[in-house]
Image: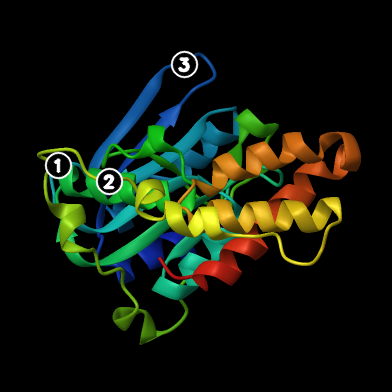
């Protein structure tokens, strides 16, 4: 696919999610940030962005600030998890580099202000393994169809996008308790599921891979962050798997997550 296809597919997915205005940001190699704020999607200066990108600028986009939008963002998800959740909720998954994680844009049932988006993104990042440093409610994501110079100039590509009208019934429904301000101590997901974690077992496979599979499943069932589990598994398997440790760990966590959660948030 041409780079322009990835850009237009991302913008089309935003329109279908009822997001029609955006802030475009470019970071030049010098570190200078250039902004085009609160523009209609069709008015975004793409020719300018592509010229800047060709000279090393990073290109980012977010829904325009100061408005309520029915869409939330997650950064640095394991690709398999990002793609499963995108398919389950009519969302958009974007691969930012071949070896890196994915961005995920999820349409929601209701429009959310910036603070509400922050709460929802923090909740989702804890469940799915996203970057907890990118849950502010106004965080920038990379614009698909442009080069990621931070990763050597690789292309930022759409890997899952909504393809029909069915996504309207698939939009993310947010639990009421996620939207309520936290006024006192609340049991964590890990604490709430501790008994399940303690009861877990690796099953009949006593090989190192079988034991690691059981450990990953138990950690996911207890509410541990998948990204943290992935990093720990890379360390556990490094001596045995060598250069294959990262691929093995990513695949193991993604398969276990799909088995336990069925791809559902």
Q: Are marks 2 and 3 in contact (CB under 8 Å)?
A: no
**Can you tell which quarter of the image residue 5 is in?**
bottom right
Q: Horizontal and vertical percent for residue 146?
A: 56, 45
Q: Secondary structure at mark 3?
A: loop
Q: Horizontal and vertical percent for residue 98?
A: 70, 47
Picture residue at 76% right of the left edge, 54% below the top? 211
Q: Horizontal and vertical percent for residue 68?
A: 14, 53
Picture residue at 79% right of the left edge, 58% below the top? 210
Cα separation between marks 2 and 3: 42 Å
Residue labelled with disc 1: 182
Cα separation between marks 2 and 1: 11 Å
**Can you tell which quarter of the image residue 11 is in?**
bottom left
Q: In the rendered structure, which disc, 3 or 1, sits on the residue that comes first in sequence?
A: 3
Residue 191: mark in rendering: none
27 or 218, which lies in front?
Answer: 218
Please tell me whether residue 258 is drawn above or below residue 197 in the rendered image: below
Residue labelled with disc 3: 31
């Amino acid at each position: 696919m041409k780079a322009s296809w990835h850009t237009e597919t991302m913008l089309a997915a935003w329109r279908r999610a009822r997001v029609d205005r955006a802030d475009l940001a470019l970071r030049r190699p010098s570190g200078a940030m250039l902004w085009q704020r609160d523009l209609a999607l069709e008015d975004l200066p793409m020719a300018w962005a592509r010229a800047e990108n060709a000279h090393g600028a990073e290109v980012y986009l977010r829904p325009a600030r100061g408005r309520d939008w029915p869409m939330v963002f997650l950064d640095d998800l394991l690709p398999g998890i990002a793609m499963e959740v995108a398919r389950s909720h009519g969302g958009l998954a974007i691969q930012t580099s071949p070896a890196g994680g994915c961005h995920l844009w999820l349409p929601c049932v209701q429009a959310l202000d910036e603070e509400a988006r922050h709460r929802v993104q923090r909740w989702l990042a804890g469940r799915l393994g996203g970057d907890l440093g990118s849950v502010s409610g106004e965080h920038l994501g990379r614009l698909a169809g442009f080069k990621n110079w931070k990763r050597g100039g690789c292309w930022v590509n759409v890997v899952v996008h909504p393809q029909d009208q069915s996504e309207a019934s698939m939009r993310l429904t947010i639990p009421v308790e996620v939207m309520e301000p936290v006024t006192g101590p609340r049991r964590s997901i890990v604490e709430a599921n501790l008994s399940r974690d303690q009861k877990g077992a690796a099953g009949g496979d006593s090989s190192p891979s079988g034991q690691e599979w059981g450990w990953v499943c138990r950690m996911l069932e207890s509410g541990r962050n998948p990204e943290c589990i992935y990093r720990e598994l890379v360390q556990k398997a490094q001596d045995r798997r060598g250069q294959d440790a990262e691929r093995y760990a990513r695949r193991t966590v993604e398969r276990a997550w799909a088995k336990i959660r069925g791809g559902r948030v």
